Image (tube, rainbow, N blue to C red):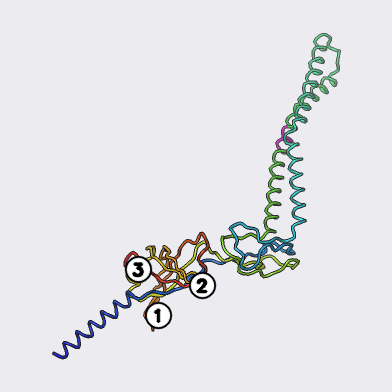
Amino acid sequence: MKLTSSVLCLALLSASTLAMAQSSPVKGQITIIQEVEVPAQETGVISKILVKPGQRVTKGEKLGSLDDVDVLLDLKRAKIEVQIAEQKSKSGIHVKLAQKGHLVALAELRRGEEAIEKYAKALSITEMDRLRFTAEQAELAIEQAQELQGLAKLDLDLKKHEVAVAERKVQRHQFVSPLIGVVADVNHEEAEFVETGTPVFRVLRLDRLRFESRVSVTRAQAMKVGQPIVINVQLEEGKTADLKAELTYISHEVDKIKRDVKIAAEFDNAKLIIKPGMRATLKSTSAE
């Protein structure tokens, strides 16, 4: 009887412990999902640093630039060459001139032929050959002018491509934030020489963050990636906020001592209210 009673007590104690594990708060921390180093894409001297550590930036915002005087001059030259090429491609003067020359040569040939019809010895054979050659040469001159016109259009395309290359070169002298976030580090100062690939800025993404925590194996088995959860974040001045998040990660590796696993959930932070490092608690899941 005493044995049965002891077994019953142990069973009740185990059930109670399991219930407490399931209902106990799951505490965690807010972390960043992405951090990006913004390197120099060209070798040169830093001419401008436009941001400071801790400053919020938007995607595409300019952070600084390398000395770009030379590349801007190259761009200006390329644009002028495009204007010249456009004028050449649009100008049909050479084709028109060749057509006029062809008409004149044909008229001279006809007059020669008419003269021979009236008087056989009006023009020599050599003179008639010259007139025929001149007419044929004038016809070929039209084709040549048309070919040159086509080449001028191709040259215009080439000049436009050179402008695109020059514009890309100018862009590569700029430091631009690849995401919405905050500047974590500025590694170099103005007037410093940097080589291609040298990290100059480090930016943390803040518009989407991650909640990380650990839960018991039993609780993890009731979760699945993709399910919605609610977390309670501890804000400044003792305030809290409930946020909807999506479970994105459940580790398959169980801690040998604590018998728990790591979980992570992501959530939108468009207003940038939540900051990395804040503490949070898993409030509920759709399975609970």
Q: Circle 1 sits on which residue?
A: 255
Residue 169 location (% of width, % of height) = 70, 55
Q: Which residues are magenta?
A: 146-150
* Relative height, residue 119 to residue 288 (above, below): above
Residue 269 location (% of width, % of height) = 49, 62
> Residue 90, located in which quarter of the rendered image?
top right
Q: Which numbered dot is residue 243?
A: none
Q: Amino acid at mark 3?
A: Met
> Residue 171, located in which quarter of the rendered image?
bottom right
Q: Residue at x 70, y 59 (%)?
A: 173
Asked whether, in this view, residue 94 is left or right of residue 211, the answer is right
Inter-mark Cα distance, 2 to 3: 25 Å
Q: Is residue 147 magenta?
A: yes
Inter-mark Cα distance, 2 to 1: 23 Å
The residue tagged with tag 2: helix, strand or loop? loop
Residue 266 location (% of width, % of height) = 45, 65
The dominant secondary structure in magenta is helix
The residue most toward the top is 118
The residue tagged with tag 3: helix, strand or loop? loop
Residue 287 location (% of width, % of height) = 32, 66
* Relative height, residue 48 to residue 97 (above, below): below
Q: Circle 2 sits on which residue?
A: 277
Q: Nearer the viewer, mark 1 or mark 3?
A: 3
* Closer-to-camera residue (119/193): 193
Q: Circle 3 sits on which residue?
A: 223
Q: Residue at x 33, y 77 (%)?
A: 21
Residues packed near mark 3 inside 10 Å, few (<14), some (14 to 19) or many (20 plus):
some
Q: Nearer the viewer, mark 2 or mark 3?
A: 2
**Nearer-N-terminus badge (2/3):** 3
Q: Amino acid at mark 1?
A: Asp
Asked whether, in this view, residue 260 is left or right of residue 178, the answer is left
Labels 1 & 3 near each other (Cβ < 8 A): no
